[in-house]
């Protein structure tokens, strides 16, 4: 158990809909990362938040957005969903202290768009 | 942009064999991380490396931070069926300290 929690574990929805994925980082970690992993693909970095502020952006679509709240939990919002958005979505957290920046991953949310 | 290459892309080995895989980059990295992902699960951190030349073990796993700082190696000794999964390397580039870049992964299959 990495200490990172994600809800829900599974999500099935229809094209055009909007969903929200939730992540709680490990206690003490200020940084949250979101990744997308399609079938048999690697990890695609979407976005990073640090202590409530957006720090880095990867290949995140305009239909996707995220935020990190004062209690440090984060939400990833996916809208106007398409079939190709079906994937595993992972959240990771990191303490980001000096060189110690290992990311610890949550169990993921499996999104299926029908 | 900065990219990590992992080789081999996939490997099939007999139980009990030793395994070697590597991760390379065209630029210098300050940190190397190795993760293992089981199907449908989140990646789990295996080993973290912070200094060039550093050799670190975690049970049957040993990883090294390459002297050139452009590569890293992961070895698994005496493989067992539960070693099956995808092994990702990740690194923090010297010139982009805020970023962590992941490699495409090496898929390991162990034949009992």
Image (cartoon, grey):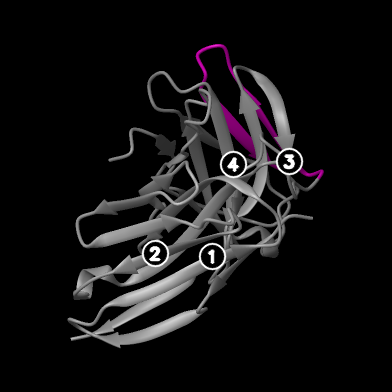
Chain containing the residue with disc 2: B
Task: Kindly indicate the quadrant of the structure image that contains residue B48.
Answer: top left
Picture coordinates of residue B90, whole percent (x, y) = 53, 52
**Coordinates of residue A25 in the picture (x, y in percent):** 44, 28
Q: Which residue is mark 1?
A: B23
Q: CA distance from mark 3 to mark 1?
A: 18 Å
Q: Which residue is mark 3?
A: B95
Q: Residue tagged by mark 4? A: A34
Front disc: 3 or 4: 3
Indicate left or right for A61 with A15 as reference.
right
Q: Determine the CA span between mark 2 and mark 4.
A: 26 Å
SS at mark 2 in the image: strand
In the picture, which quadrant includes the C terminus of chain B? Answer: bottom left
Let me know if marks 2 and 1 both belong to one chain.
yes
Going from N to C along the chain, the mark reached first, 2 or 1, is: 1
- Percent of width and height locating residue B70: 61, 58
* Residue drawn at (36%, 49%) of the image: B47
Question: In the rendered structure, the residue with mark 4 lies on which chain?
Answer: A
Task: Determine whether, in the image, residue B27 is placed left or right of residue B104.
Answer: right
Q: Secondary structure at mark 4?
A: strand
Q: Earlier in the sequence, mark 3 or mark 1?
A: 1
- Disc 2 to disc 1, how far (Cα)? 8 Å
Mark 1, residues whose alpha carbon is within 10 Å: few (<14), some, or many (≥20)? many
Q: Are marks 3 and 1 in contact (CB under 8 Å)?
A: no
Name which residue lies at 67% across and 45% down.
Answer: A46
Secondary element at image label 1: strand
Give yes or no for contact between labels 2 and 4 (Cβ–Cβ under 8 Å): no
Q: Name the quarter where the N terminus of chain B is drawn.
A: bottom right
* Chain letter for the residue marked with disc 3 in the picture: B
Most extreme residue toward the top is A70
Mark 1 on the same chain as mark 4: no
């Amino acid at each position: 158990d990495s200490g990172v929690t994600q809800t829900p574990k599974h999500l099935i929805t229809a094209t055009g809909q909007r969903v929200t994925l939730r992540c709680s980082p490990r206690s003490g970690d200020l940084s949250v990362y979101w990744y997308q992993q399609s079938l048999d693909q690697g990890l695609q970095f979407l976005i990073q938040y640090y202590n409530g502020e957006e720090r880095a952006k990867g290949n995140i679509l305009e239909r996707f957005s995220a935020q990190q709240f004062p209690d440090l939990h984060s939400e990833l919002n996916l809208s106007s969903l398409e079939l190709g958005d079906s994937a595993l979505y992972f959240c990771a957290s990191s303490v980001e202290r000096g060189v110690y920046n290992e990311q610890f991953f949550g169990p993921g949310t499996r999104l299926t768009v029908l | 942009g900065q990219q990590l290459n992992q080789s081999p892309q996939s490997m099939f080995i007999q139980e009990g064999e030793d395994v070697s895989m590597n991760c390379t980059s065209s630029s210098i990295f300050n940190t190397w991380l190795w993760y293992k992902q089981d199907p449908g699960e989140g990646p789990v951190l295996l080993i973290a490396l912070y200094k060039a030349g550093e050799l670190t073990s975690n049970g049957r796993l040993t990883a090294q931070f390459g002297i050139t700082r452009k590569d890293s190696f992961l070895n698994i000794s005496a493989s067992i069926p539960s070693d099956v999964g995808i092994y990702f390397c990740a690194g923090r580039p010297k010139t982009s300290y805020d970023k962590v870049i992941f490699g495409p992964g090496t898929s390991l299959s162990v034949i009992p």
